Image: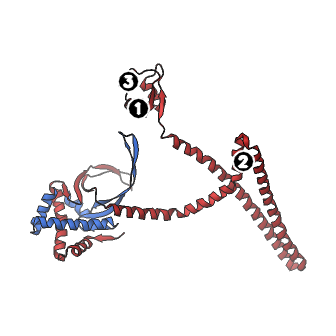
Amino acid sequence: MEKLTIQNIVDAFVAQTGASKKVAEGLGRAFFDVIIEGLKEDGVVKINGLGTFKLVNVAPRESVNVNNGERIVIEGYKKVTFAPIDSVADVSEVTAVVQKKAKKDAAKTKKPAEKKETKKTVVEDSGQFGGIDSLIATPESAKVVKKAAEKVEKAAEKVTPAKQAEKPVETPKAETVKKEDGNKNNGKLVKALLCIAAVAICILLAVKFCGGRSGESEEAAPVEKPVVEQPKDTVPEQKTYVLQRGDFLAKISREVYGTADSVNAIIRLNKITNPDSIEVGTVLLMP
Amino acid sequence: MNNRTFIDRMAKKLGSDADELQQQVDVFVQALLSQVNAGNSVTIKNFGVFEQKMKAERKIYNPTTKSFNVIPAKQTVGFKMGAALKEKVQ
């Protein structure tokens, strides 16, 4: 976005018409001077191809002085407003601008989108657990549940050997170091190395623990989503009410919406001609 | 003040023919709008600033068809008066 002045417009005008710069500048000055004159005289100036300038009164209003909390009155004034004509922008230009904005928005949302993707993969990994829960609900799937359970056990087994495998890898290192260096000074080094190895194992275990936890928390997400989607589906459906003996429209409105304000809307929607006598059993559409 | 009197007043000031001036004003307005539509802000001394403005898309309810329609986002031209103009019109 550039900040232009009247000079840029005058230059564009000169380039388009071939008029002298002096004439163009005079035209530009007269254009806005006459607008001001018109505003002073009538309060309204209409210009073909541009829009309407109007002089509007702004009423005086009370405000509070930010520094000392005193009430002050901001005096009323006259304001110039501008209402452009409807076709002020070409359609092609509008779409170009909208596309630009969309691109910007896309660039902004790119980073969060990537995060979401990684989250999704986590959900898929832990999907086995959620899958079992949902399968148990259906009666046919006992076998499938067993198979799935076996899968989970296998997966669990895979995890534990991995833990065990890591431990031996690191401890032998420490032991070999012990055997090689028998000196007192090196003894300290060995202790330090042992400490580091222990810390490393702790971190590995902690990471796995946290990973499991985050997996659990993500499991809840897919369960919640369908619940949110359900009301969306039901919104477009038309609500109905079957009329019973002793019902009257205000009562129905109060029951359904909590207020009797919707009576007129019900009458309009059902094209009721006489609201005082409606047959029992008629199905009313609710707005 | 309608467009007719506006052009007549300008013609009187510049001493030129009203019909010719109308054409020149049309070109001038187009030059102004094309810059604003391109996303630039045009500042006019002692008058104000013309700027591109986006109107967000909105939903409207049509009571006769009982349906919700989306009016798409659109671009329009905004104007803010300058301090000098404010003083002049009081």
N-term-proximal mark, 3 vs 2 = 2
Point out which mark residue A132 bears.
2
Q: Up-down: is B34 above or below A249?
A: below
- Chain containing the residue with disc 3: A
Of labels 1 and 3, earlier in sequence is 1
In this picture, residue A130 sits left or right of residue A246: right
For the C terminus of chain A, which image quadrant?
top left
Q: Amino acid at mark 2?
A: Ile
Q: Chain B appears what colour?
A: blue
Q: Secondary structure at mark 1?
A: helix
Looking at the picture, tell me which residue is in the foreground, A54 or A251: A251
In percent of width and height, residue A161 lies at 82, 62
Per the image, the residue denoted by label 1 is A262
Q: Colour of chain A?
A: red
**Mark 1 to mark 3: distance in Å?**
13 Å
Residue occupying the point 83% across, 70% down: A169
Q: Nearer the viewer, mark 2 or mark 1?
A: 2
Q: Quadrant of the N terminus of chain A?
A: bottom left
Identify the mark at residue A275; answer none if there is no mark: 3
